[in-house]
Amino acid sequence: MTTQQLIDQIKIKKSFLCIGLDVDLNKIPEHLLKEEDPIFSFNKAIIDATHHLCVAYKPNTAFYEAYGLKGWKSLEKTIAYLNEKYPEIFTIADAKRGDIGNTSTMYAKAFFEDLAFDSVTVAPYMGKDSVEPFLAFDNKHTIMLALTSNQGAFDFQTNLVDGKELYKHVIETSTSWTNSENLMYVVGATKAEYFTEIRQLIPDSFLLVPGVGAQGGSLQEVCQYGMNDQVGLLINSSRGIIYASKSENFAFAAAEKAEELQRQMEVILT
């Protein structure tokens, strides 16, 4: 998917919502546990109920890898279903990969070619030769960790290096890498005050923003400081939507929660 196609979907749906598909079998409705593939059954129901309200889905691969081969098969079925039924949806493999060049190339092939995701999250700690292999794929996007929403982010990311916060060095350096136009960045919603300075560094890039909702981030503040002329934001919500209910009507409850966010986004866009 191209960036322009993503922008077009945001305009059509009046939404920049990304729904995280982080499936924990201990949290899904009990009646689904009788299904042959409860993870896929859960995802399919959520997707069918919410696809018109969001522009992206983001399965966190850890929630699938934890269940071994069965979990990975559920992930394969989920992305295949999305690509077949809702090809206009932007898909994110939240895998946070990052390794030496030849290994990163194999990671990229796994997510971009085998699974056919539109994007994958990566960790930049090993530098450009661990990220550039992901950037080499046409019409695929690499979403790099920049400033995260977890408490431990302050251990390193905001430390000063030569008078400048480390995350700023990371962002600035990444813009010089080959095919850097294929980069997006993860910036946590719980750090809304940083968005203004981040936008000075990367005014045109899309930002994937976790932390709205369950983690306490403010949608209004993120949009105030982080939105650009093309919106440039994907606001992720996972638990607040997919676990809205454990009843048999769980998908309807998820859609209600997604619609609440979509309506707020529509107001902001208009």
Image: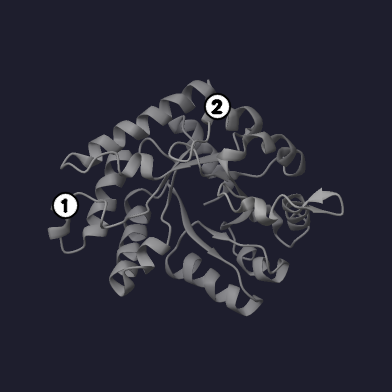
On screen, residue 96 versus residue 225, left or right, reads left
Q: Residues within 10 Å of mark 2 (few under 14, many from 20)?
A: some
Instruction: Indicate the position of residue 2 as horizontal and vertical percent values.
Output: 56, 50
Q: Is residue 265 visible?
A: yes
Instruction: Judge whether residue 228 can be spotted in this image.
Output: no
Using residue 142 as the reference point, say whether residue 212 is left or right of it: left
| Secondary structure of residue under mark 2 | helix
Outermost residue toward the bottom in this view: 102
Looking at the image, is mark 2 or mark 1 earlier in the sequence?
A: 1
Q: Which mark is residue 60?
A: none
Side of 245 relative to 13 (left or right): left
Using a 10 Å C-alpha cutoff, classify the residue at mark 1 as few (fewer than 14 neighbours), some (14 to 19) or many (20 or more): some
Q: Where residue 22 sits in the image (x, y, percent)? A: 37, 54
Determine whether, in the image, residue 105 is placed left or right of residue 49: right
Residue 61 picture quarter: bottom left
Q: Which dot, 2 or 1, sits closer to the camera?
A: 1
Towards the viewer: 157 or 238: 157
Q: The disc labelled 2 sits on which kind of residue? A: Gln
Residue denoted by label 1: 30
Q: Amino acid at mark 1?
A: Glu
Q: Nearer the viewer, residue 172 or 142?
A: 172
Q: In this orientation, which residue lies closer to the viewer: 117 or 62?
A: 62
Q: Identify residue for label 2.
A: 220
Give the residue displayed 69% in from the left and 38% down from the top.
194
Where does the image place residue 166, in percent across and percent down from the top left?
A: 75, 54
Query: In the image, is residue 128 above or below residue 169?
Result: below
Q: Nearer the viewer, residue 113 or 21?
A: 21
Identify the image's colour scheme: rainbow, by chain, secondary structure or one colour.
one colour
Q: Quadrant of residue 228?
A: top right
Element class at badge 1? helix
Residue 206 location, x and y as percent?
61, 44
